[in-house]
Image: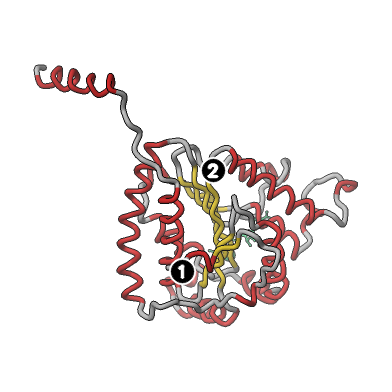
Amino acid sequence: MNLDKFKISDGKNFKISEFKTDFTGDLDSKKEAEKRLKKNKEKMRELQDKFYAHDKFSLLIIFQAMDAAGKDSSIKHVMSGLNPQGTQVFSFKQPSKEELDHDYLWRTSKSLPERGRIGIFNRSYYEEVLVVKVHNLVKYQNIPSELVTDNIWTERYNQIRNFEQHISQNGTVILKFFLNVSKNEQKSRFLKRLDTPSKNWKFSAADLEERKLWDEYQKCYQQAIRETSTDFAPWYIIPADHKWFARLLISEIINDTLENLKIEYPSLSDEQIANLEIYKKQLIEE
Ligand code: ATP
Ligand code: MG
């Protein structure tokens, strides 16, 4: 698959409306996609094993989307291809009192993946230029009022770019997935949550309130992606109306990224290899 068409490394001209939410490429069946996803997951395990052994890079994968776009289920599927030992998932909700006592990058910074690990963020500091902007929540964030000016969003885009550059220059590889679902598809997923007893718990009345602000959110997503797409932290616009396609594409991007790092298992020195023989002999003669 040509992954470049989903990738935004320079957001200057990014327009959300130019990206189809129901794109499935040359794949027209879910069955074929699932077969490929299964293979990709096996490959991902192998790549992750080397990544873990190499222990120098970290991989940060950010998921952002409107409600019901499939963040949770995509994470579930991707994760099931990984070794839990080298993986961590953090979900970011409304900040707690303690979190609001710090700058907004604090809670995400302390959740960044260690070297050799893959860290998944279900929502992230991007909420700070999405929900916080749409609902004008800055006033509840305990920031000294003289620091909150009309420049606040420009400053935040800058802070985010700088933060991402900082962690990338220190060994964190960053992937950012925007699950791009249509308003219609969201409606049918909400209806399904209401109609299916085992999905009822997923529905929240607040989701309907957010849906009313759809256009505001789309604008904020577009601007955030414009401002924060870089070579070192590109956004990927994932067509998300067909969950099977979104999952497959995400797995392809992760594998491609890991492969491009060209990591091999750490090699041993001649002396260390010679020692292996000695240890072996010791064990056998025990
Ligand atoms: P689901 O898809 O299962 O509904 P979710 O990620 O929407 O999962 P919820 O508990 O429903 O989880 O919602 C979390 C809420 O927290 C979201 O509405 C999100 O916008 C909000 N949130 C996240 N970060 C912040 C933040 N920094 N400031 C204010 N609200 C935030
Ligand atoms: Mg929700």
Q: Camera-side residue: 13 or 171? A: 13
Task: Name the outermost residue toward the front.
Answer: 270
Residue at horizontal 45 percent and vertical 62 percent from the top: 250
Instruction: From the image, tell me which residue sits under label 2.
Output: 172
Residue 278 position (above or below residue 16):
above
Residue 246's mark? 1
* Mark 2 nearby-residue class (10 Å; few <14, some 14–19, many ≥20): many
Residue at horizontal 57 percent and vertical 82 percent from the top: 184
Q: Is residue 68 left or right of residue 43?
A: right
Residue 62's mark? none
* Element carrying mark 2: strand
Give residue 15's position: percent from left, percent from top. 67, 72
* Element carrying mark 1: helix
Residue at horizontal 11 percent and vertical 17 percent from the top: 286
Find ligand 2 in the image and state its quadrant. Answer: bottom right
Q: Camera-side residue: 77 or 159? A: 159
Give residue 25's position: percent from left, percent from top. 44, 76
- The amino acid at mark 1 is Ala
Give residue 252's position: percent from left, percent from top. 42, 61
Q: State the quadrant of the N terminus.
A: bottom left
- The amino acid at mark 2 is Thr
Residue 62 position (above or below residue 201):
above
Pointer 1 with pointer 2, Cβ within 8 A: no
